[in-house]
Image: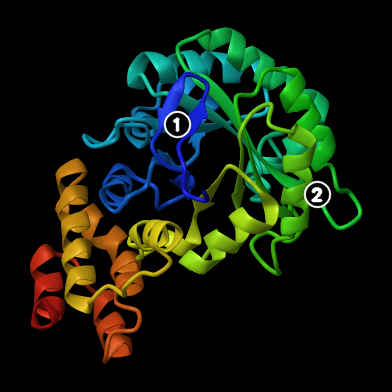
Amino acid sequence: MLYHPVKIGKTELKGNLFLAPVAGYSDRSFRSICVEEGAAFTYTEMVSAEALVRGNWKTEELMARAPNEKAYAVQIFGGEEDVMAQAAKIVVEKTHCEVIDINCGCPVPKIIKTGAGSALTRDPERLGKILAAVKNAVGDKAAVTVKIRSGWDAITITWEEAARAALANGADAITMHPRTRTQGYEGFADWSKLKALVQLVNGKIPVFGSGDLFKPEDAKRMLEETACDGVMFARGAMGNPFIFTKTINLLKNGSYEDIPASVRLNTAFKELELLISDTNEKHACMEMRKRFCAYSKGIEGGAELRAKTIHANTLADYHEIFDAYL
C-alpha cells in the first residue's frame, strides 16, 4: 500500500505525505493550511543555529507550532557541532517539537560558506559529528533526522558516505533531494540515487524523498520507483496545499478531483488571515503577494490578477482584486 503510516523515532504518523522545509514559505500559517489539506507531517523553514544561540527572537518565531500540528519538525542549520547542540536544546525547550531535522542540503552560498547545508553532504565526517552532538543534546526529547543532497557536483557524489555517517551516528530518518549542490533547483532530480539510498538503508530507518514532486502522479511514481517510505512536497505545494488531499485520493482510490478556483482563493484568504494574526497586516500582505500569484495560476484572467496582486498592501486590496472569483 503506497499510502501508509510512518514512524520517526517514537512519533507515529498517520500518513507518509509531508510538507518539506521551504525557506520563505513554510511558516506557521502555510503549515497549518497544509495540515488541514492532509499533510501528515510538516517541517519549519530552516532556522539558524547561530541565531538561536544568540537569542534572536525573530528566529524563534519561525519555530512556533501551529494549533493543528499534532507533530512537526524544526529544521536547523549550522556548521559547528557545539553551536548545533546548543541550538537543539533551545529548540526542544521552546517548542517541544517531535523532530529536529539537520539541513545538509541547502545550496545557497551564504549557508555553505559557514560549513552548513550542502557542505555537510560533502563532509560526512562533520555531518556525523554534528548529528551525534545534537542527538546527545536532546536525548529522548526529540528524534533527530537529516536531509541530504546527492552530492556536490556531477563528479563529487557523496550521498552514500553521508548516509553511512548518518546511520552510524543514530539518525532517526534520512531525506534525500537527489540533486547536487551545483544543480541547485535546476535540471532533474535523479530518483535512481534515492532508490539506491533506500536499498543501502535496508529498512533500518525511514527514507523519504524530495525533488520534482509537482503533482499527485509524481508522488505515486516516486513511491513506486524508489520504494521510499514517504515523500516531501516542496515547490509542488506552493499555492497548492491541495496536493496533499489529491495525492491521498490518488493513492487510496486511484483518482482525484481538481479544486475549483473559488475554493483555492478562499484558502488563500484563510492563509492570509492566519499570517496577519501571527505577524501584522503589512508584513502578511507583502508576503502573500507571491502566494496569491501561485494560488491564482490557471484561473481565467490570471495574468491580470497577478499584475494587480504584486501591488496589494492591505486585506482590503486583496478582496478588491479577488472577491469576484469567490
**Residue 74 numbered mark, or none:** 1
Q: Is residue 153 visible?
A: yes
**Residue 244 numbered mark, or none:** none
Disc 2: CA contacts within 10 A as few (<14), some (14-19) or many (>=20):
many
Q: Quadrant of residue 43?
A: top left
Horizontal side, residue 244 vs residue 114: left or right: left
The answer to whether 101 is drawn above or below residue 33 in the figure is above
N-terminal label among 1 and 2: 1
**Colour scheme of this structure image?**
rainbow
The answer to whether 162 is drawn above or below residue 94 in the figure is below
Q: Quadrant of residue 304?
A: bottom left
Residue 13, x across and y down, in percent: 41, 33
Quadrant of the image containing the C terminus: bottom left
Q: Residue furthest right?
A: 155
Horizontal side, residue 172 vs residue 115: left or right: left
Q: Secondary structure at mark 2?
A: loop
- Mark 1–mark 2 distance (CA, rounded to whole Å): 24 Å
Residue 56, x across and y down, in percent: 40, 27
- The type of residue carrying mark 1 is Val
Does the CB distance between marks 1 and 2 fall below 8 Å?
no
Q: Secondary structure at mark 1?
A: strand
Name the one closer to the observer, 49 or 45.
45
Residue 263, x across and y down, in percent: 19, 70
* Picture residue at 34% right of the left edge, 18% below the top: 94
Horizontal side, residue 22 vs residue 299: left or right: right
Q: Which residue is mark 2?
A: 152
Name the one closer to the observer, 73 or 85.
73
Name the one closer to the observer, 218 or 322.
218
* Picture residue at 52% right of the left edge, 51% below the top: 2
Residue 303, x across and y down, in percent: 33, 88
